[in-house]
Image (tube, helix red, strand yellow):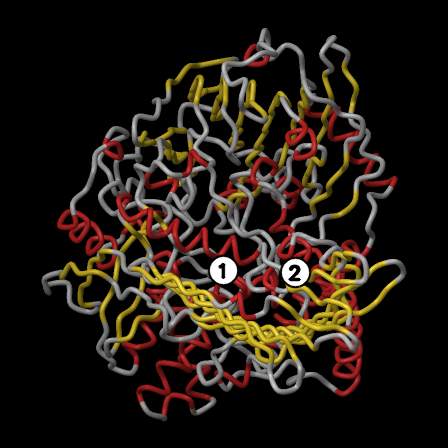
């Protein structure tokens, strides 16, 4: 959604109201659990249009059903990922995203309407991403693991089909009639998600389905293929465009006999810039059926899925590539001099000069990528409009510290809906600070989960931040507060230079790293053992408080289906949701919003129940309530707090009249890591994301007529340079079993030789999670 530059009194209301209309429609669809007959018809139509699982594909012909990995649970016999870039040229076309008005007006404007429709700063193209996989299931675990397939049915044209191939060659298509919607998109395995799909956000939550496959056996082959249509912006510069880079790991979750990447482009004005890392293969290019095809092939790739805590894109073989459109030989005007240049490494000093050039003398640079997405005007014009609106509300007359925060929240209120780029945020926020004469600096780094600075190949890989009064300000996305750094930049090497003076010499330095005090989670879990028909259940009342990067990781799922934006205006003295409406419109808007919140309140428990089942690894018999206490999106109240009440099944075992209760498993969930023999040897650094502290306090009344045994034996302590795992079990004066658990990870990364220290913590945590409390009958 694009925002106006000069906010009117009812500006925020319009944006929020538009968002709510979208989300009402989405919630209505989401509430329909099973796939509908109409959706099945659409899927069948789309499948026929794109011709999935064709036998003529040479990459899937003569693929052996046996493999060199007889001990592996499953093997990918072949997989192929194709990206078809359909550049919007000077024709109206019929595909999604093309401008119909340009076509309708073409006869009376001698075709100029088509040109302007396509050269407009809101043009876009469509990327058709196709994924096909053929997986051999070699044991019962694989049969169970791949007995559920996932697919997206969200954009027009999305398609999916699957089949089972038996040992004798018999093929059975997978029936999608019983497919159901996925409650939590985070649970969709990466094997079923597309690379070019946009990130889920408040305004975009694609619909996924899952379908169970009965009657599979060891030795069966499951083969599926899907097509996702994803729109890519083509803003402002019709002569040159660099699309978002794509990162591809050679090592997949399973060993792969053959894997292929293909980028199909419409003409020779498209290019693929790429860098192969850690020995990954290179691309080759051919002309096929009038299209330029870039092809990448990798054979007999082992899996490293059992190597825990690996920063995969940094440490493992991978290829990253970027599709570039360049008309009129303009492809040498940005960042790198030619198509081979991205293959070379870059020094911090070289990055300093390039970043300064990009910041102070951008020229065409700003229009090469998605830096201006969400803006109707340039950076300076946007900043002036925001500053003018702030001045009308008398925000500009307070202290500098207050202005810095209010400006940040004002920016956040707009990026919430239009998703500004990091560069766009930095330019606008810098201009706002400059309006007040506040000195500040620009910080340039990369994402530590995607690329080191040395291997940065594309301008889109750079992260842009502001440093002001020794505090750091990052692109706020939907939730981030002032002075909160995202996980992906913490501790990174960076380049720093004066935002307003090109002549100052850049400084290279690491960004602040986080620690165990900044990133904390405190969970109080009240538990009651309750009898049920022929069994016992655990009734749980859980209150969680999170801050720092732990909060960042929880935000999306905790705030989904909640009206978290409702009181945003209080953070930055913005406009209330209903200001500027007449009485009749306000009454209608409030009523519709109340209905929306009611629907959200019904959908939220369903989503959280799904998350809880993944977390505890047991059946959630009932998820009875979720309450958001504090959303953590305010500088003054930056801690995320919420409460949930639920009932777990399969967490109490009976031995005669005695009860064995899995209370320790409630500290961190039931999916603790069990190390295997091949986890011991290690060559990769240990990547732990970030330093953190996790505190759990579990309180369970001893059931009447029972005695608790083995509680004191839960007291353990493991401490080393990697962190600590400390537990204490006791019975308090009120005859409650009280279990206190404190887990700390001291560093974000350890050298490979310190892996035994991490293993010591993981083993202690796993052993504790398998412990049980015995309630013996008196």
Nearer to us in this view, 126 or 745: 745
Q: How far, Cα to Cα, is label 1 from label 2?
A: 43 Å
Q: Are marks 1 and 2 in contact (CB under 8 Å)?
A: no
Residue 568 is drawn in which quadrant?
A: bottom right
Within 10 Å of disc 1 (Cα), the crowding (few <14, some 14-19, many 20+) is many
Question: Helix or strand or loop: what does disc 1 sit on?
Answer: loop
Picture coordinates of residue 447, whole percent (x, y): 34, 52
Question: Helix or strand or loop: what does disc 2 sit on?
Answer: loop
Picture coordinates of residue 588, whole percent (x, y): 80, 79
Quadrant in the picture for the C terminus: bottom right
Nearer to us in this view, 769 or 592: 769
Which comes sooner in the sequence, label 1 or label 2?
A: 1
Picture coordinates of residue 78, whole percent (x, y): 55, 19
Q: Report the disc number at residue 419.
A: 1
Residue at position x 30%, y 26% in the image: 279
Residue 112 in view here: no
Residue at position x 46%, y 29% in the image: 303
Q: Report the disc number at residue 662.
A: 2
Within 10 Å of disc 2 (Cα), the crowding (few <14, some 14-19, many 20+) is some
Q: Is residue 197 left or right of residue 591?
A: left
Picture coordinates of residue 467, whole percent (x, y): 26, 71
Residue 429 in view here: yes
Residue at position x 25%, y 32% in the image: 343
Image height of 651 relative to 385, above or below: above
């Amino acid at each position: 959604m694009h925002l106006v530059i000069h906010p009117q009194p009812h500006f925020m209301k319009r944006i929020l109201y538009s968002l709510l209309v979208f989300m009402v429609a989405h919630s209505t669809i989401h509430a329909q659990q099973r796939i509908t007959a109409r959706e099945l018809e659409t899927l069948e139509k789309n499948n026929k249009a794109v011709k999935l699982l064709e036998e003529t594909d040479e990459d899937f012909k003569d693929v052996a059903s046996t493999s060199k990995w007889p001990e592996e649970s499953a093997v990918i016999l072949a997989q192929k990922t194709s990206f078809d870039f359909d550049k919007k040229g000077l024709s109206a076309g019929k595909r999604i995203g093309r401008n119909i008005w340009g076509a309708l007006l073409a006869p009376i404007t001698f075709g100029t309407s088509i040109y302007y429709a396509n050269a407009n700063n809101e043009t876009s193209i469509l990327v058709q991403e196709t994924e096909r996989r053929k997986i051999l299931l070699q044991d019962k675990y694989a049969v169970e693991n791949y007995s559920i397939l996932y697919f997206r049915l969200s954009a027009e044209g999305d398609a999916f089909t699957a089949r089972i191939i038996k040992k004798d060659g018999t093929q059975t298509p997978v029936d999608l009639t019983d497919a159901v919607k996925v409650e939590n998109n985070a649970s969709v395995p990466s094997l079923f998600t597309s690379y070019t799909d946009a990130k889920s956000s408040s305004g975009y939550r694609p619909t996924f389905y899952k379908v169970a496959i009965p009657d599979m056996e060891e030795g069966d082959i499951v083969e599926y293929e899907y097509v996702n249509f994803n729109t890519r912006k083509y803003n402002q510069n019709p002569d040159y465009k660099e699309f978002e880079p794509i990162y591809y790991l050679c090592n997949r979750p399973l060993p792969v006999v053959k894997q292929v990447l293909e980028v199909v482009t419409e003409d020779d004005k498209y290019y693929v810039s790429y860098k192969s890392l850690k020995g990954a293969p290179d691309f080759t290019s051919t002309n096929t059926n009038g299209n330029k095809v870039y092809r990448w092939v990798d054979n007999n790739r082992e899996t490293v899925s059992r190597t825990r805590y690996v920063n995969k894109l940094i440490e493992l073989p991978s290829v990253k590539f970027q599709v570039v459109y360049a008309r009129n030989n303009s492809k040498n005007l940005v960042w790198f001099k030619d198509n081979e240049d991205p293959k070379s490494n870059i020094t911090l000093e070289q990055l300093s000069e390039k970043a300064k050039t990009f910041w102070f003398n951008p020229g065409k640079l700003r229009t090469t990528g998605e830096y201006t997405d969400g803006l109707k005007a340039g950076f300076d014009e946007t900043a002036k409009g925001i500053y003018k609106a702030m001045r009308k509300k008398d925000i500009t007359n307070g202290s500098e510290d207050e202005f810095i925060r209010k400006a940040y929240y004002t920016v956040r209120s707009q990026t919430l809906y239009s998703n500004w780029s990091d560069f766009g945020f930095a330019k606008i926020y810098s201009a706002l600070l400059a309006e007040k004469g506040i000195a500040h600096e620009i910080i340039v780094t990369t994402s530590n989960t995607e690329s080191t600075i040395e291997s940065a190949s594309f301008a889109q890989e750079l992260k842009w931040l502001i440093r002001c009064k020794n505090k750091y300000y990052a692109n706020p996305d939907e939730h981030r507060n002032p002075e909160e750094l995202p996980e992906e930049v913490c501790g990174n090497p960076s380049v720093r230079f004066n935002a307003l003076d090109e002549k100052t010499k850049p400084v290279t330095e690491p960004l602040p790293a986080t620690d165990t005090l900044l990133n904390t989670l405190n969970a109080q879990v009240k538990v009651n053992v309750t009898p049920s028909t022929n069994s016992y259940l655990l009734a749980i009342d859980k209150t969680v408080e999170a801050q720092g990067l732990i909060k960042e990781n929880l935000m999306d799922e905790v705030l989904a289906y909640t009206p978290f934006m409702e009181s945003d205006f209080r953070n930055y003295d913005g406009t209330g949701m209903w200001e500027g409406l007449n009485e009749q419109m306000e009454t209608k808007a409030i009523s519709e919003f109340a209905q929306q919140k009611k629907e959200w309140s019904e959908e939220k428990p369903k989503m959280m129940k799904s998350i809880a089942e993944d977390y505890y690894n047991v059946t959630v018999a009932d998820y009875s309530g979720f309450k958001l206490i504090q959303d953590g999106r305010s500088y003054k109240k930056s801690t995320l707090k919420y409460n949930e009440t639920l009932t777990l099944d399969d967490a109490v075992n009976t031995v005669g009249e005695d009860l064995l209760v899995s209370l320790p498993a409630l500290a961190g969930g039931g999916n603790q890591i069990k190390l295997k023999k091949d986890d011991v040897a290690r060559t990769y650094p240990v990547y732990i994301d970030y330093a953190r502290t996790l505190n759990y306090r579990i309180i369970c009344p001893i059931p009447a007529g029972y005695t608790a045994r083995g509680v004191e034996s839960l007291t353990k302590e493991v401490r080393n340079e990697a962190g600590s795992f400390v537990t204490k079990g006791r019975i308090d004066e009120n005859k409650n079993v009280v279990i206190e658990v404190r887990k700390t990870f001291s560093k974000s990364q350890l050298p490979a030789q310190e892996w035994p220290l991490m293993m010591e913590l993981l083993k202690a945590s796993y052993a504790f999670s398998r412990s049980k409390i015995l309630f013996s009958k008196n």
